[in-house]
Image (spheres, rainbow, N blue to C red):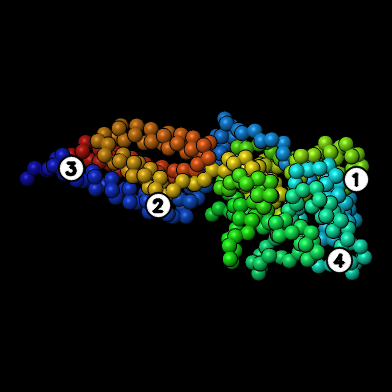
Amino acid sequence: MDRPEEGDRPALPALLAVVVALAGLAFSFTPLAERLDAWLLDREWSVLRAVAPRPAPDAIVIVGIDEASVAAIPQPLGVWNEPLGEVLVRIASGHPRAIALDVALPDRSLDGLRPGLDRALLVGLAAARRNGPVVAAVTIDARTRSARPIFAPYVAVLGEDGLGIDLMARDIDGVTRRFSLALPIEGGGFPTFAGRVCMRLTQRCSDGLLDFALGAPLRYVPFHTVLEMRDAARVRELFEGRIVLVGNAQRYTERIAVPFALAAWEPGARDVPGIVAHAQALRTALAGTAPREVSRAVTALLVMLAALLVLARRGIHALAGAVAGVLLLAGLAVTALHGASFVPVGAGLVTLLAAGVVAAVRARYRFVH
């Protein structure tokens, strides 16, 4: 009996395309696909940082608690009520747009150590509050997963609208690439640190992916430099009209893994002080450039289109289609990201590869037989 020609089996290529598409859709739900999309996202940001960086206004100043500041101040960091209060008074005298503290405030009175310590910090917080919006970070206890308390008089000065949770999301590989304006809690949501600052300044805040193409690497003014500053004109030059973030800038404390170096004083570092990650989140939220991930329907469509490569009748057509498909998906991903949309293309690329292999095998089979 003669072997039937493939033209006598028109359903076979379509069936293979369906199988490849279903396999690609299944892959898109796996942790491996999530890791691949995260890796590809970093490559896309690398392209945009190189060819289409976005300038950011010089609107954020970091006052960093660095090693030199810790060495210059005799008190242990946990009882910096006096130096922190003085720095807040000094910053407020420069008339900043807002002040935000990513510093753990005491959870109890410290007057037992020395009378007047509580008042020293209260004076600083009150000066910051009189100047304008002031926000303090609420830290989460990793053991109990509850908010660490803050001494009640400090909360009274700050007000409920002066608190924000200092957590940032991590992707499957432990790297932070996105941020939220608020986190779900029992009975609703509570603003994050960057979210609270943004919402105190404008109603047009947006969250999503961190915009790693926005702005130059961030710099900081050492905490002890501000503490020792006596020149009112210099204080105003540094802080007037800017958002001042106060936080830890030391090399080995409170680090957040990110895909790019965001701190100018640590070139090449892929983990940054938490205050730097919060500053980039705030930059992105205020600029309204946070990309949002598209719906899964788009991923499914890309997978199904990629699976159509199975229908190629010649090996050279499969190769050309695979190359064209890779270029199209890469261009789509980068263009969409520049337009503030994140299109995960990992599953589409894997499906394209699988479809190309199947098409090449089919072409080889026809050639042999």
Distance from disc 3 to disc 1, alpha carbons, whole Å, reads 82 Å
Q: Which residue is mark 4?
A: 110
Q: Residue at x 73, y 66 (%)?
A: 149
Distance from disc 4 to disc 2, alpha carbons, whole Å, reads 56 Å
Q: Choose the circle earlier in sequence order: 2 or 3.
A: 3
Q: Height in image: 251 above or below 336?
A: below
Q: Which residue is mark 1?
A: 228
| Label 2–label 3 contact, CB within 8 A | no
* Crowd class of label 3 (few under 14; some 14 to 19; many from 20; radius 10 Å): few
Q: Which residue is mark 3?
A: 10
Q: Which residue is mark 2?
A: 27
Q: Amino acid at mark 1?
A: Glu
Q: Height in image: 215 above or below 209?
A: above
Is 160 on the left or on the right of 228, as rendered? Answer: left
Q: Amino acid at mark 4?
A: Leu
SS of the residue at dot 1? helix
Q: Residue at x 93, y 65 (%)?
A: 115
Distance from disc 4 to disc 3, alpha carbons, whole Å, reads 82 Å
Q: Choose the circle earlier in sequence order: 1 or 2.
A: 2
How far across and how far down the image is residue 24, in percent? 37, 49
Res 214 → quadrant: top right
Q: Choose the circle earlier in sequence order: 4 or 2.
A: 2
Q: Nearer the viewer, mark 4 or mark 3?
A: 4
Q: Choose the circle earlier in sequence order: 4 or 3.
A: 3
Q: Residue at x 62, y 54 (%)?
A: 168
Res 235 → quadrant: top right
In this orientation, which residue lies closer to the viewer: 199 or 193?
Answer: 199
How far across and how far down the image is residue 120, in percent? 88, 58
Q: Choose the circle earlier in sequence order: 3 or 1.
A: 3
